[in-house]
Image (tube, helix red, strand yellow):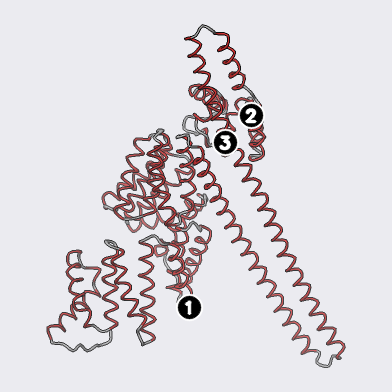
Amino acid sequence: MKRFILKTNKKNLKLRMFILFLIVYSSQISNAQSDKAIDSIQKVIPTLHDSLKFDSYILIFKKTLRKSPDLSKTYLDSATYISNNLKEIKTKESKTLKLYDNLGDYYYRISDFKKLEELDKKIVSIYLKKENKKKLAVAYNNISRTQERLGKFEKSIESVMKSLKLQDELGYAENKKAFSYRSLVTLYGKILNYEKSNFYNKKLEDIYIKSNDSASLASVWGSFGLSYKKAKDYDNALKYYKKSSKIYEVLKNKNSLAHNYNYLGSLYISLDSLELAKRYLKEALNLGKAVKDKPKIAVSLNNLGVISNRQKKFNDAIGYLEDSKKIGREIGHRHLLIDVYFNLSRAYFGKRDYRKAYINRSYQAKLKDSIFKRQSIDKINELEIKYQTEIKDQQITLQENEIDLLEQKAKVSKLQKTLLGGGLLLSLGIVCFGFYGFRQKIKRNKLEKEKVDAELAFKKKELTTHALHLAKKNEVLEGLKQKAKEFNSSENNKNGYQQLIRTINFDLKDDNNWKSFSKYFQEVHKDFNSNVKQKFPEVTSNELRLMSLLKMNLSSKEIANILNISSEGIKKARYRLRKKLNITTEESLQDLVLNL
């Protein structure tokens, strides 16, 4: 470190040298000592050289980030001001990079992943220009983490692979690649490629067993638990999550415990152990709030909403889900919001607020469509870039060949040269015309797809509205029927009331509404009926009706209203259907139907 002169007495000089010592060895200082050190640094900062002022503000920022992100940002702003006004170029560059790293920590802490992605891209571009492979490998890992939080899983995988390629070029040992392997475990799990997820997870397990790293091994076991959960092997999933949680409990790792408890809660929901699930999820919520991790808090609230829906506590469910929705919107967690909107729709339907139920289901559909369209646009853009690159390469090759030809035939006549130039222009014209045609084809395909998507969305809305109408209509008619029975028992004129009951019964059994519903259903789920008949030829028409309503993810009460049978009748019908489809008690009828 360069020498600097301070115009003060020896006592203050010793104090400043002590502060310099704190900056260098800050990671080894306890929290109590750190608070005292921060007070001392703040008092003497005005007398320090700019470079040391910058380091002092960064140190205080790091020490206050976890406790108070808003307060820590003020120290980071002070460091930014100093960095912007530094005159020495090399010092300014090093301080700017250090500033970016810490600003990234701040954005990650407050879950502002959109700003973090912009910052990560800026850091990558800097290290690409510097050709610093070591720093670039770290930068690619960081941007991958950010892209994963934004739901850009394929781009995130690409970034990790770039990092691993650089690490191979640098000759890194397997244990140094652990961070990248962990990212790939998570990412492949999220795109449902469990074979690759487990492949990288096994690499991690070998690394951490050799190094006796219990905390990291706990993370690996948690990942195995997730894979088993997705494969519906709940016994093994519980075993691995509990093994992982025991280590985190010993280590008092609140962040990782919140993550594990969320998954344990989700597992117990799948097993219909709702009270046990609620216990884990409330503990996860408290831990998430303690560490101020917004994504974990949002997941806990969403799952608590699922439990409340199952228990018919719809007001509680709406409270949890609205809070989860607010956080999901704030952090841009689109995949979580899809689940939240669906669960809100179920809650409002349970309260018979059909307008809000329909609105939330529409939001869910729009969000799904927007994610699909964004992915499609990204792929089209990627293809177009590749195509343009190939065209440019062809043009360059063509021009190089032309130059060689002109050098070899310097004495070619003017007429030959003119013809050759004309041929070149014609070739370029053909290439340009082909490129124009390709772009027009992409536009036509995009318009056709948008038209089909719009028609499908409209049919989905009609189908949902029709199902809600059927459920409501049958529910109202059943109520009228019960009223008529009450009047019948108290009045003498039984003939008129008997006629009323027969009319309502006829309306309840009328198949016209069901035919309309069936028509819309087959337009939305075109291959469903044929798939059922192909796989399960013994299924009756009534059982096919039940499976159609299960495909729409309706509750047993909603299905009972539509089919005009009791809740007990629905249970018996489901039991008979499970038996006919040869489904074990561990398997889910709902999941089987949804996957058809």
**Dot 1, crowdedness within 10 Å: few (<14), some or many (≥20)?**
few
Q: Is residue 315 above or below residue 217?
A: above
Q: Amino acid at mark 2?
A: Asn
Label disc, if present, on residue 131 of the rendered structure: 1
Is residue 508 found left or right of 336 in the rendered image?
A: right
**Dot 3, crowdedness within 10 Å: few (<14), some or many (≥20)?**
some
Q: Which residue is mark 3?
A: 551
| Cα gap from disc 3 to disc 1, whole angstroms | 54 Å
Image-quadrant location for residue 384 = bottom right
Task: Name the residue located 32 percent from the left edge and 80 percent from the top edge.
Answer: 82
Q: Amino acid at mark 1?
A: Glu
Q: Quadrant of the C terminus?
A: top right
Asked if the residues shown at circle 3 and circle 1 are in contact, with their CB atoms under 8 angstroms apart, the answer is no
Name the outermost residue toward the top: 492
Task: Name the residue located 85 percent from the left edge and 91 percent from the top edge.
Answer: 414
Q: Quadrant of the N terminus?
A: bottom left
Q: Amino acid at mark 3?
A: Lys
Give residue 263's position: percent from left, percent from top: 39, 45
Q: Nearer the viewer, residue 247 or 379?
A: 379
Which circle, 3 or 2, is nearer the viewer?
2
Give residue 160's position: percent from left, percent from top: 48, 63
Q: For mark 2, give the secondary structure.
A: helix
Label whose residue precedes the other's in the sequence (3 or 2): 2
Q: Is residue 207 above or below residue 541?
A: below
Image-quadrant location for residue 407 = bottom right
Label disc, if present, on residue 463 of the rendered structure: none
Task: Name the residue located 57 percent from the left edge and 11 percent from the top edge.
Answer: 498
